[in-house]
Image: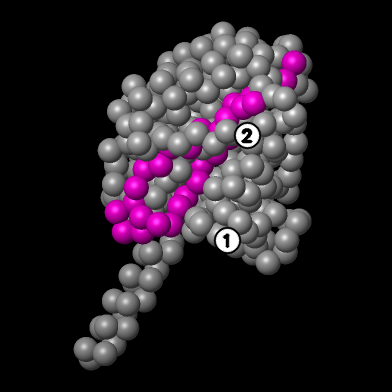
Amino acid sequence: MKKITTILLFSLSVLSANAQTFIKAYQDRVNKLRKEDIESNLKEFEKLGIKTTGSEENDNALNWIKDKYLSFGYSEDQMEEDPFSIGKFKSKNLIITKKGTVFPNKYIIICGHFDSINGPGVNDNGSGTSIILETARILKDVPAEYSIKFIHFSGEEQGLVGSRHYVKNIVYKDDIKQLDIKLVFNLDQVGGIKGENNDTVFCDEDRGGISANNEASRAVTQELIKCTTLYSPLKTDIDPAEDTDYISFEEKGEVITGFFEYLRSDLSHTKDDTFANTDVMYVFNVGKAAIGALQHFAVANR
Ligand SMILES: [Zn+2]
């Protein structure tokens, strides 16, 4: 009898560890996301101008992001800059680390680029930037089992230059792996099309590149879909991962997933990628899904 009970209890606990059920504490934190904060982030991001990698505007954007983390209460020693250059142009990635309680040396990376090209890039990628910022603000004092790195990449529009630099020089040193990464969760272009019914988000699954990590990406993308359904009003669809910073990690075998808008704006990389053309409510809803998912991935306190 005891044996049966033990087996039963064991299988129940396995079930509860894997099955993604609704967690009230996660929802309560998701509810701390305010549409007004997303809106003011996007407006401030627009004001910073065209953030071409290597420009003064690009530097100003990086400092704006840094100041946000300081205002949330993150300390200077949780922040790390990763400078790189493209020819004569210099730029930096910004990394903020929040230590895990059980697995301090295993990392969940949530990332997105802040550089833009031809325009202020409010959708591509002020949207992802604003969500990462609010996620960091809301989860700052929430214990989580895994360490979280919030990463803001530059040089994305020049061909993932910033993220490739990060992977080559920080994740690896002299080709020796330094960081144990559980998964990479990227947000790029989640601003939708103003005036359209943006009710669906693409969850990006790795279907190319190195094939050894595809199955793990499929599994975490399924978890991302589930979190989106649990903690946001959005519907989901799956698209193949491509053309953004997680690819730099994928190429080294890491497990990746991400969000991308379902109705694709054709204004990215133009002067019209502005606040006026971005659906703030959609960014807000993707933000809810992201906060739910990051808590799930990092195993935040229940
Ligand atoms: Zn982008």
Classified by dominant secondary structure, the portion drawn in magenta counts as strand
Q: CA distance from mark 1 to mark 2?
A: 20 Å
> Of label 1 and label 2, which has the lower sequence position?
2
**221 falls in the magenta region:** no
The crowding category of the residue bearing disc 2, from other C-alpha atoms within 10 Å (few below 14, some 14 to 19, many at least 20), is some
| Of 101 and 127, the residue lying toward us | 101
- Determine whether the residue tagged by mark 2 lies in a helix, strand or loop: strand
Give residue 63's position: percent from left, percent from top: 48, 20
Quadrant of the drawing holding the N terminus: bottom left
The crowding category of the residue bearing disc 1, from other C-alpha atoms within 10 Å (few below 14, some 14 to 19, many at least 20), is few
**Which residue is painted at 52% across and 23% down in the image?**
62
Give residue 33's position: percent from left, percent from top: 39, 28
**116 falls in the magenta region:** yes
**Which residue is painted at 63% across and 49% down in the image?**
168
Give residue 215's position: percent from left, percent from top: 64, 64
Residue 127 in which image quadrant: top right
Amino acid type of disc 2?
Phe
- Determine whether the residue tagged by mark 1 lies in a helix, strand or loop: strand
* Disc 1 target residue: 176
Residue range in magenta is 90-118
Give residue 259's position: percent from left, percent from top: 61, 39
Which numbered tag is attached to residue 86?
Answer: none
**Which residue is painted at 69% across and 47% down in the image?**
247
